[in-house]
Image (spheres, rainbow, N blue to C red):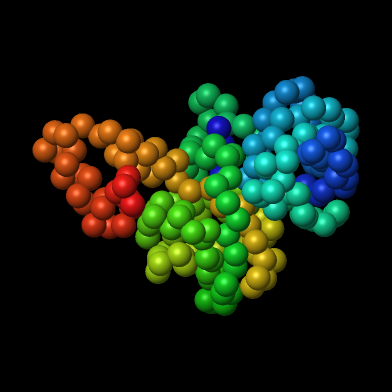
Amino acid sequence: MFTGLVEAQGALVRRQRRGPGFELSVRAPFTSYVLGESIAIDGVCLTVTAFDASGFDAELSLETAEKTTLGRLALGARLNLERALRAGDRLGGHLVSGHVDGRARCVERRDVGRALALGFEAPAGLERFIAAKGSVTLDGVSLTVNAVTGRRFELMLIPHTQSVTSLGALQVGGEVNLEVDLVARYVARWLETGAPEAPAARGLTDALRAAGLLQDPDR
């Protein structure tokens, strides 16, 4: 489990075929690695399989390579890194699993004073999990959604986020790893597959359906 608060920037130094998947080598500033620990790389939870003073290696399955950007990033690309949350740590972002739902495409970029407004298009089917003032994770960064229109959503990067993550350099047409809000995903699944028929539950179901956050199972 992660928070979406990037701890450090790393770089992809090698991507080598391992069966149908890949082995990644990442240059990172961390110390005292633990073999088998989880590290989020651009929002993708991967397991450390080897390490040395310069960084660590991690296995990338074929499905993860196809669903995320990690199978196509250029060598030398900047990576947002976060080590797993420890019990007792501050939860400064929001609950992030590191299980990417798909790739979102940047469709707009504009300066707003010192801030940077970015617009994205979500993969079809994921837009119902994205709400104004809700949370999303993009390339491992916890962010607040400003507005939503259909599959498009907009958010704002403050100068600090621009400087400590890779999102400040993102250009129109670029893709990022998108993880929708964990709570929204499970609430929608619960309601779609057998929510209690108590009046309160029916009221919640009707409200979520009216907001476009819930689909009828027979559609």
Which image quarter: residue 171? bottom right
Q: Nearer the viewer, residue 75 or 191?
A: 191
Nearest to the observer: residue 145 or residue 125: 125
For the N terminus, the image quarter is top right
In the displayed structure, does residue 46 sit left or right of residue 15?
left
- Residue at left offset 69%, top offset 35%: 46
Camera-nearest residue between 71 and 158: 71
Q: Is residue 98 left or right of residue 188?
A: right
Q: Quadrant of residue 116?
A: bottom right
Residue 159: quarter of image: bottom right
x and y percent of residue 180 in the render? 48, 48
Asked if one can make out residue 55 in the rendered structure from this viewpoint, the answer is no
> Can residue 13 be seen in this snapshot?
yes
Q: Position of residue 215 (x, y in %)?
A: 32, 50
Rendered residue at 67%/30% (across/down): 38
Q: Residue placed at 49% from the left, 52% from the top? A: 136
